[in-house]
Image (spheres, rainbow, N blue to C red):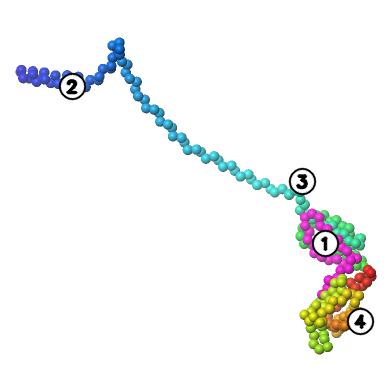
Amino acid sequence: MRRIAIVVAAIGIVAVGAWWVGRPAPPPATSGGRPAPPAPARVAPPRAATPAPPREAPRPRAPRAKPAAPAATDTGAAVPTKGTLNVTSDVAGASVFLDRNYVGTTPLTLDGVEPGARRLNVTAEGYDGYADTVTIAPGANDVTVRFKEVRLSASVAVVHKHAMGACEGRLVADTHGIRYDTSRKDDAFALAFNEVDAFEIDYLKHTLRVKKRGGRTWNFTDRQPTADALFVFHRDVEKARQKLAGAR
């Protein structure tokens, strides 16, 4: 029994010692002998908030295209889209035809003409008619017809008959006179109308004769089977010669 009491006492002593060692340390005393207040608990600093990624600004929508307005001039007036045709002539009252439709007499102003190529004919009694293709542009378009002015621009391919052989070339006439262009230089010539003594055609023989006043004679034939081209050339030249003679 005595041994048991000693063992129990030893266990008690060990338990008291373990309690003494594991107890919390008493707070330090202040200068007045009172225990110091417990230290404030340490608080972890707040974490900095992670900034949210910037939001992409919405892209502005392209403005819708408005229907194109008519262009304006420097003065603010709209640019015309139709043409105005002004036709004058040196013979008053000449008849005007546009695309073969009669539209009036000169002087004439025709509004609202569609732009583009148009056929214009102007006629006056006693004069050769005027015929041309005119290009109408938006805005004003002016055409002046001079019936009294002599115009001549004619040519024809010919063969010049020599005493022996022949050569080819082209007869050309304008208001300055008539000339023969050929590669054979000794046959080529240029004559003013007042130098021409004879200018005659023989339709049946397909021959056109040109004689220089006080000089040489040239006989020409047409390259074609008929003398039609020679006839037209002779007619146009004679008509212009007569007008030029009357204007002097």
Kind of residue sitting beneath label 1 = Leu
Answer whether labels 4 and 3 touch (C-beta < 8 Å): no
Rendered image quadrant of residue 109: bottom right
Q: Secondary structure at mark 3?
A: loop
Q: Residue at x 78, y 46 (%)?
A: 75
Answer whether labels 4 and 2 touch (C-beta < 8 Å): no
Q: CA distance from mark 2 to mark 1?
A: 133 Å
Q: Earlier in the sequence, mark 3 or mark 1?
A: 3
Q: Which residue is mark 1?
A: 98
Give me the disc on residue 233. Answer: none
Rendered image quadrant of residue 151: bottom right
Q: Residue at x 89, y 82 (%)?
A: 215
Q: Which residue is mark 2?
A: 18
Kind of residue sitting beneath label 3 = Gly
Give me the disc on residue 214. Answer: 4
Q: Secondary structure at mark 4?
A: loop
Q: Residue furthest toward the bottom?
A: 164
Badge 2: residue crowd in 10 Å (few <14, some 14–19, many ≥20): few
Q: CA distance from mark 4 to mark 2?
A: 165 Å
Badge 1: residue crowd in 10 Å (few <14, some 14–19, many ≥20): some
Q: Earlier in the sequence, mark 1 or mark 4?
A: 1
Residue 225, image x, y percentages: 80, 82
Write down the region rendered in magenta: 129-155
Kind of residue sitting beneath label 4 = Gly
The rendered magenta stretch, by its main secondary structure, is classed as strand
Q: Residue at x 89, y 72 (%)?
A: 240
Q: Examine the rendering and report whether any part of residue 138 can be seen.
A: yes
Q: Earlier in the sequence, mark 2 or mark 1?
A: 2
Q: Is residue 179 above or below residue 38?
A: below
Residue 205, image x, y percentages: 85, 84
Q: Secondary structure at mark 2?
A: helix
Q: Which residue is mark 3?
A: 76
